[in-house]
Amino acid sequence: MEFRFSHPELASRPVTPADREFLRLLYHSTRQDELAVTGWPQERIDAFLDQQFEAQSDHYSKHFNNDGFTILAEQEKDVGRLYLEEREDEIRVIDISLLPEHRGQGIGGSVMRDVLDLAGSRGKCVRIHVEQNNPAQSLYQRLGFRKIDEHGVYLLLERAPIPSPA
């Protein structure tokens, strides 16, 4: 699933096996703060995060079509990932993650607006699972997502399709 980003310096490319180390480090960066409060030594945190990364990667490869798995790059430097899956009635955001130094700069919002535009052009809604304590929830609310279900610590959010202007 290819589309253009409105962010002028953002590009994407398909995930390849050569991206594994970047993806591992990116995953670590999304969970580091959460585990820092455990009091565990960094080696234990790293081992735990490696195990969780492997489990997530295995789950994604077994349950999702990886045609929409992309690396996000800004000025040719890898800054994150966007995993999408187009379904009959929706575009599912499986994962969107950015390196810490690229968060809070509008990149994620720009990418999500582009996903919403793509979905609107195809008459589809966008759905995403998000942890209840994820700070990105405020972004999703601003973009018009609403909670449609709850699974433990995860909320399933949906944004109904808005047709693109002709």
Image: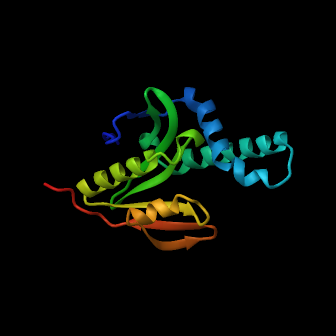
- Looking at the image, the residue that sits furthest to the left is 166
From the top left corner, tell me how far across and down residue 127 is, in percent: 43, 61
Q: Quadrant of the C terminus?
A: bottom left
Question: Compared with residue 107, is residue 136 higher up or lower down, i.e. above or below?
Answer: below
Left/right of residue 119 with respect to residue 26 in the rendered view: left
From the top left corner, tell me how far across and down residue 75 is, in percent: 43, 28
From the top left corner, tell me how far across and down residue 148 is, in percent: 46, 73
Question: Compared with residue 39, is residue 77 higher up or lower down, i.e. above or below?
Answer: above
Visible residue check, residue 63: yes
Residue drawn at x 72%, y 41% is 50
Visible residue check, residue 122: no
132 or 123: nearer the eye? 132
Q: How many marks?
A: 0
Residue drawn at x 79%, y 55% is 37
Question: Compared with residue 115, is residue 6 higher up or lower down, i.e. above or below?
Answer: above
From the top left corner, tell me how far across and down residue 122 is, in percent: 25, 55
How are the colours assigned in the image?
A: rainbow
93 or 33: nearer the eye? 33
Residue drawn at x 63%, y 31% is 21
Left/right of residue 128 with respect to residue 116 in the rendered view: right
Q: Quadrant of the N terminus?
A: top left
Residue drawn at x 40%, y 52% is 112
Residue 41 appears in which quarter of the rendering? top right
- Looking at the image, the residue that sits furthest to the front is 105
Question: Compared with residue 30, is residue 140 higher up or lower down, i.e. above or below?
Answer: below
105 or 122: nearer the eye? 105
